[in-house]
Image (cartoon, rainbow, N blue to C red):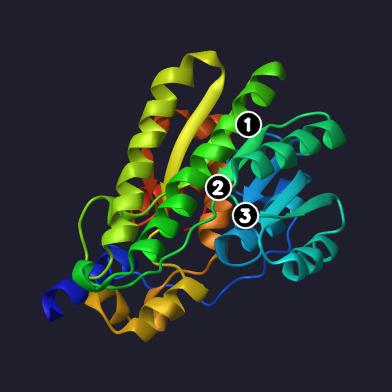
Amino acid sequence: MSNMVDCLRHSVKGARGWTVPPKQSTTFNSGDLEIKMMDIKGKTVVITGASRGIGAEAARIFAAAGANLALLARDAERLSDLVEETGGNALAFACDVSQPGVMAAALQKTQEHFGSLDVLINNAGVIAPIARIEEADPEDWGRLIDINIKGVFNGIHAALPLMKSGGGGTIINIGSGAAQNPLEAWSAYCTSKAGLLMLTRALHLEEGGNGIRVLSLSPGTVATDMQRAIKQSGINPVAALDWEDHIPADWPARTLLWMCSQDADEFLGTEISLRLEHIRQRAGLI
């Protein structure tokens, strides 16, 4: 196991022994970003799982760049605080992404309020159950699939006609390296991320020629509440990583902003890995 842990740490730190610096402030002017990006000002961005972690950081980044926001999550209080923090130019929907009717209503209201739906970031996801297959609760296993795959499908299904009516849009799914290799006690999570990667590819195949930009981001291990749950489980090499091995949540958030630009068009239909140094450079992180 020690060799696998070392490999994971190496992938987080980079090929040259690079280490993650202290978390930087997300207060910035969009014009100061040293990345090529579209003018997001005035565009409407929907973020699921927006109450914490990558989703909350993405809300801050996109708000600072001048976007209109629709923030979706189950925690109404956290969403309310985030709307206030980001300046108030946001709608908050306390909802469950696994419910298709609820998702459709939220996106419809977003378009009606702001006049467009330009970007959908499917970030909502869960890690539990962390359990070996024989010991996993079938209902918990199915619930993860409902959120991690069906929830993304629900968002995409609702967004497509709205985006097409406006001339196109960008859909970004949050993937994972877990799509590529199984990990002990992560059967549900790995299965969901593998399925999500295929959903990304299928969406690009069907809609890439219709003005819909489709990408996936595999952020690597990120310093969020999910990593705390993984650490607490004590199972598999990811749980053995030290906290300083994880990248700060604003890194994938800033990468998402870059992915909305034409500079990322060469990656359409694929999953971008933030473990790769050249991707970090392209996104303006290093």
Q: Secondary structure at mark 3?
A: loop
Count neighbours of disc 1 (C-alpha within 10 A) and say few if under 14, some if 14 to 19, many if 20 or more: many
**Disc number lying in front (3 or 1):** 3
**Disc number lying in front (3 or 2):** 3
Amino acid identity at mark 1: Ala
Q: How many marks?
A: 3
| Marks 3 & 2, CB-CB < 8 Å contact | no
Residue wearing tag 1: 159
Between 189 and 43, the one lying in front of the other is: 189
Q: CA distance from mark 1 to mark 2?
A: 18 Å
Q: CA distance from mark 3 to mark 2?
A: 22 Å
- The residue under the point 62% across, 54% down is 96
Amino acid identity at mark 2: Leu
Count neighbours of disc 3 (C-alpha within 10 A) and say few if under 14, some if 14 to 19, many if 20 or more: many
* Disc sitting over residue 256 in the figure: 2
Query: Of marks 3 and 2, which one's residue comes earlier in the chain?
Result: 3
- The residue under the point 85% across, 64% down is 84
Q: Determine the image quadrant of residue 55.
A: bottom right
Amino acid identity at mark 3: Asp
| Residue 243 image offset from top left, x and y in percent | 41, 82
- Asked if 194 appears above or below 210 in the picture, the reply is below
Left or right: 184 in relation to 251: left
Residue wearing tag 3: 96
| Marks 1 & 2, CB-CB < 8 Å contact | no
| Marks 3 & 1, CB-CB < 8 Å contact | no
Between 183 and 54, the one lying in front of the other is: 183
Q: CA distance from mark 3 to mark 1?
A: 16 Å
Residue 42 appears in the figure: no
Count neighbours of disc 2 (C-alpha within 10 A) and say few if under 14, some if 14 to 19, many if 20 or more: many
